[in-house]
Amino acid sequence: MLLVGTIIAGSIGFGTPFAETFASSVTTTVTIEDIASNDQPVELASDTQLSNSDFGSLLYEDTFESDAGVWSLQSGNSIQNGELILSPATSTFPNWSTEYSDFIFETEFRFVNPQSTHYFTAYLRYTDCAAGNCSTQVFVSSSSDIAAWHIGPDKKQLMNYTQASQLKLNEPNTLTVVAKGSEFNVYVNRVFVRSFSDASYKSGKVVLDADEAPTAVSYVRIYALP
């Protein structure tokens, strides 16, 4: 039986304790200015769909039925009514030492009363580094644009803005990212959006981030590749 908020399997991480360094170290993120200055054409997602056979064994799950102390919550964040509530301009990170390299990450989220475009971001393969935040970031906007960025000593866009019409603004949606080596495949509501490559980080943790307006997360799951 799975224990909510418990690591079931995975590779053990190492280095500086994550919980002690994260709050002061995450200084390099994608900003609204980055997004606003983007002049690339928005492309459309394809219709390739994930099925249950595309998922390996479940390595980690949290359904936020209670606050088990697994996630370090910044001021204003909370766990209530089966959801992790991310306040604007805050991040939450796991109090675990496990790092994941090849995996399938999936989370179900919803934008809370969106009044304008705002963003929900997953930092994947997060690792402590001199730049403060080294990670591969995938974000979803309330206007249905999906993109990805490499964050570290250098910052670059990995995936052009892509319109995912399958995203429903006032309903829960799933973000799924399949990471295998340097290759990442992104899905919204299990419909393929786009692929990108980032060979910089071999393994790391997962961080969740909300910008501009609250976001509610109803589960986080990490699967092995099939």
Image (cartoon, rainbow, N blue to C red):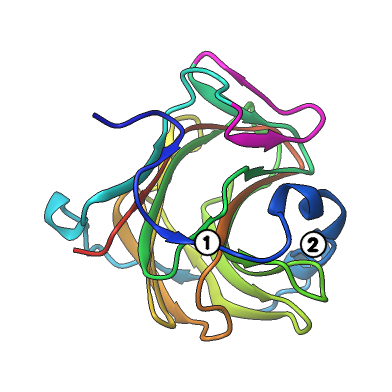
Residue 157 in the image: state x and y as whole percent: 64, 79
Residue 39: quadrant of the picture: bottom right
Q: Quadrant of the C terminus?
A: bottom left
Q: What residue type is labelled 2?
A: Thr
Q: Which amino acid does label 1 sit on?
A: Ile
Numbered circle sitting on residue 31: 2
Q: Which residue is drawn at 29% across and 56% down?
A: 191
Numbered circle sitting on residue 185: none
Frontmost residue, 150 versus 159: 150
Tell me the magenta residue range. 69-81
Secondary element at image label 1: strand
Whether tag 1 and tag 2 are in contact, CB under 8 A, the answer is no
Q: Which residue is drawn at 73% across and 80% down?
A: 155
Where is mark 1, residue-wise?
146
Frontmost residue, 127 versus 157: 127
In this rendering, does residue 40 appear at all?
no
Q: Does the magenta stretch include residue 220?
A: no
In this rendering, does residue 128 appear at all?
yes
